[in-house]
Image (cartoon, rainbow, N blue to C red):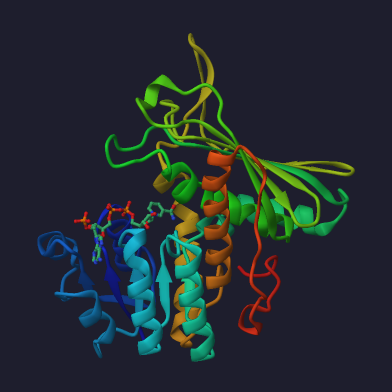
Amino acid sequence: MSLRVGVIGTGMIGQDHIRRLTKVLSGVTVTGVTDIDPERAASAAPEGCQVFETPQALITSETVDAVVICSWGPAHEEQLLACIHAGKPVFCEKPLVTSSESALRVMDAEVAFGRRLVQVGFMRRFDADYRRLKAVIDGGTLGLPLMYKSVHRNASVPVGLYTSDMPLNDTLVHDADISRWLLSDEIAGVEVRLPRRSRQGGDLRDPHIVLLHMAGGAIVDVEISVNVSYGYDIRGEASCEKGIAALPNRPATVISDAHGIRQAIPEDWRERFIEAYDQEFREWIVAAGQGTATGPSTWDGYAATLVADAALRAVDSGNRETITMRDKPALYAQPVSQAA
Ligand code: NAP
């Protein structure tokens, strides 16, 4: 039987996920959509899909088995709690929520329910290149990972919508999550360094260098640049005791002509991670069909939120900010290395 899915938030990524759920993947039907803007919801609704007036009406509808949340971060907590209350599996785009207190409220509700229902949209864990990189690190032939370099460059971000805090509370969460997953470790401290400001972003504080101190002693350096102009450039490199494992640039046609030898660079996340998003939803559909969730969890969303909070504190203090996590509930006992 097809999994009947309701989508909350029909903006940029909501529309992209509706396309993949209706045109790419099987075993799933989008039966409901809702958005603050009813016209946007109506124009994104596939044929035969109901447009709901509110997220609550969509979540509690008998025609919706599972929910995909693509609204903006501050709305996620209320929508997640309503899904958990209704006992429905829910895929929530990152960030899980926008504060650690809010993450704890979602975690408490899921733990009280007694079964995992939430998967967070950390799609890098489903990317074939990242999975191969992790397999090499976990394989152990290179010895222990000592350092990891994560480069996160966007061509540009919307002027006016993006604030100086967003690279740290919205973008860094991807690098924090992938570092925890690749190195199978939690993040214990965060430092931030601010290089000369790029003139491409106006008043925006950009770029950032972030140091993530892993609990086991490895150090991750993250470059976040959100106005590089030339494209979407995601890189990773693990320095281990006996060698280096690097994430390759995406394979692309190599053009040789009078201007030299060159390859196209992805325009944005939709192009770079298109197969990762597909795979992320393939695995979610299987788990949601069984009334549960696998993959990145509420615990992982909580960890990323703590890193974002600590990074913002580190901008103000100039110091290394410590992260203290609550004890991990048994519901999330699976080691960080094995989720997805
Ligand atoms: P967007 O284009 O602004 O779309 C969000 C949509 O949700 C808008 O239509 C918005 O309406 C609507 N909305 C906001 N609050 C709502 C509420 N309480 N109930 C119902 N609808 C609501 O943003 P986006 O780029 O699609 O991003 C959506 C989420 O996906 C964000 O959490 C973002 O961080 C995440 N995201 C993840 C990735 C990834 O790589 N995994 C990439 C992009 C985005 P208004 O515009 O009227 O507020």
Q: Is residue 324 above or below residue 129?
A: below
Q: Is residue 213 left or right of residue 243?
A: left
Q: Nearer the viewer, residue 315 or 280?
A: 315
Q: Nearer the viewer, residue 183 or 221?
A: 221
Residue 200's x, y, as percent?
38, 23
Q: Is residue 195 left or right of residue 265?
A: right
Q: Nearer the viewer, residue 211 or 94?
A: 211
Q: Is residue 43 above or below residue 198?
A: below
Q: Nearer the viewer, residue 148 or 113?
A: 113
Q: Is residue 126 visible?
A: no
The residue sitting at 67% across, 44% down in the picture is 320
Residue 250's x, y, as percent?
55, 40
Residue 77's x, y, as percent?
38, 71
Q: In which quadrant of the rendered image does the C terminus lie?
A: bottom right
Number of on-image labels: 0
Which residue is most to the top? 258
The residue sitting at 72% across, 49% down in the picture is 213
Q: In which quadrant of the rendered image does the N terminus lie?
A: bottom left
Which residue is most to the left? 39
For ligand 1, the image quadrant comes to bottom left
Residue 134's x, y, as percent?
71, 55
The residue sitting at 55% across, 30% down in the picture is 194
Please identify the quarter of the rendering in which residue 181 is found.
bottom right
